[in-house]
Image: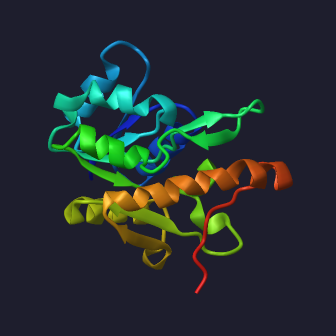
Amino acid sequence: MTLIAVLGNGRVGSGLSAGLTRAGHHVTVADRSPGAAADAARAAQVIINATPGAGSLERLVALRDELAGKILVDVSNATSDGPDGLPADLLHPGSSLGEKLQQALPDTRVVKTLNTMLYTVMTAPAALTQPPTAFLSGQDEEAKRTVHRLLEDLGWQPEWIMDLGGIETARATEAAVLFVPHVIRSSGFTPFAVSIAR
């Protein structure tokens, strides 16, 4: 059992919290009340950032002390929204939210994952008609192994999980969010994910 704090209680955070709880982990979800995020992060071994990506960097830097020595799993994409509310542009072109977080939180082990799919796929990857791919980006190998095990607990088969290397590779997976508005306009909110076919 892992002590996990989920920051963000929207569709992404709620789904991940429910899936990890079903897998036997002790999960705390931090709501927006003052001090809730700090309290949850302080007590956890793994913190999942499921807050809107546009404000994630500021929110998480404010938790620098609570995040020190912990694993931070970042599933967000930092984008500006278009007039229809869908992602329009990356906020960190030439970099990524994952990289910005690791630079700002050098004592925290940041792992980027689950940001290349519709949120429903995060906890139900086998529901798709073909296997999706969950990518891992991060500097710390032990942290990535821990996240790999958590993904397996959410139903991801080991062969569906791909370690891309250091946190700099997060800029590639974050750029995949630019597909999202076009896919949604084409086929609606049908579950989908990026998949590496071999």
Q: Taking 43 as reference, is 149 left or right? A: right
Please, is residue 164 above or below residue 55 in the view? below
- State the image coordinates of residue 129 (x, y, percent, origin top left): 71, 72
Quadrant including the C terminus: bottom right
Count every numbered label the image shows and give the total: 0
Q: Taking 138 as reference, is 74 left or right? A: right
- State the image coordinates of residue 58 (x, y, percent, origin top left): 36, 26
Residue 100's image quarter?
Answer: top left
Name the residue nearer the viewer: 56 or 38: 56
Identify the residue at image location x=20%, y=63%.
142
Q: Taking 124 as reference, is 135 left or right? A: left
Please, is residue 94 above or below residue 9 in the view? below
- State the image coordinates of residue 53 (x, y, percent, origin top left): 49, 36
Identify the residue at image location x=23%, y=39%.
105
Which residue, as the protein is rendered here, is positioned at the far bottom? 198
Name the residue nearer the viewer: 120 or 142: 142
- Asked if one can make out residue 150 in the rendered structure from this viewpoint, the answer is no
- State the image coordinates of residue 174 (x, y, percent, origin top left): 51, 53
